[in-house]
């Protein structure tokens, strides 16, 4: 009975140590993946910021063009109306 108990304890120690080793490897893998995910998220944020800037730049150009067009139309209308 004592011998069986000792074998069980030895086996239990071996299994727990292998489990701890696997867990530490898993932690290392997870840390590496989280670092990679953070990098990808930073790249995505940078891309989104660049996209916003491009959108704002084109929107501003559109607004300036619209303002010029409206000013031109108003100018033409004011010239063609009979003077007061």
Image (spheres, rainbow, N blue to C red):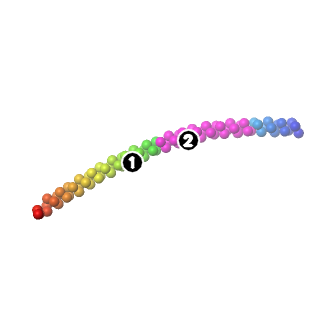
In terms of secondary structure, what is the magenta stretch mainly?
Answer: helix
Determine whether 22 is above or below 78 in the image. above
**Mark 1 closeness class: few <14, some 14–19, many ≥20 residues within 10 Å:** few
Point out residue 38 in the picture as x, y percentages from the top left corner.
51, 41
Q: Of the residues under marks 2 and 1, which one precedes in the sequence?
A: 2
Q: Residue at x 46, y 44 (%)?
A: 44
Point out residue 50 in the picture as x, y percentages from the top left corner.
39, 44
Most extreme residue toward the left is 83
Residue 21 is covered by the magenta coloring: yes
According to the image, label 1 marks what residue?
Answer: 52
According to the image, label 2 marks what residue?
Answer: 34
- Judge from the rendering whether residue 77 lies leftward or rightward of residue 35; answer left or right: left
- Judge from the rendering whether residue 51 lies leftward or rightward of residue 67; answer left or right: right
Q: Which mark is residue 68?
A: none
Q: Secondary structure at mark 1?
A: helix
In three-dimensional space, the C-alpha distance between marks 2 and 1, rounded to whole angstroms, equals 27 Å
Q: Residue at x 16, y 60 (%)?
A: 78
Depth order, front residue of 21/60? 60
Q: Where the N terminus falls, by quadrant?
A: top right
- Judge from the rendering whether residue 79 lies leftward or rightward of residue 35; answer left or right: left
Q: Residue at x 25, y 54 (%)?
A: 67
Q: Which residues are magenta?
A: 15-42
Point out residue 66 in the picture as x, y percentages from the top left corner.
26, 54
Residue 83 is covered by the magenta coloring: no
Q: Secondary structure at mark 2?
A: helix
Q: Where the C terminus falls, by quadrant?
A: bottom left
């Amino acid at each position: 009975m004592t011998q069986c108990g000792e074998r069980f304890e030895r086996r239990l120690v071996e299994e727990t140590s292998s489990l701890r080793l696997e867990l530490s490897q898993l932690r290392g893998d997870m840390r590496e993946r989280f670092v990679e995910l953070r990098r990808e998220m930073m790249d995505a944020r940078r891309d989104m910021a660049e996209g916003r800037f491009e959108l704002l730049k084109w929107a501003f150009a559109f607004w300036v063009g619209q303002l010029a067009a409206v000013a031109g139309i108003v100018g033409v209308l004011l010239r063609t109306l009979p003077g007061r």
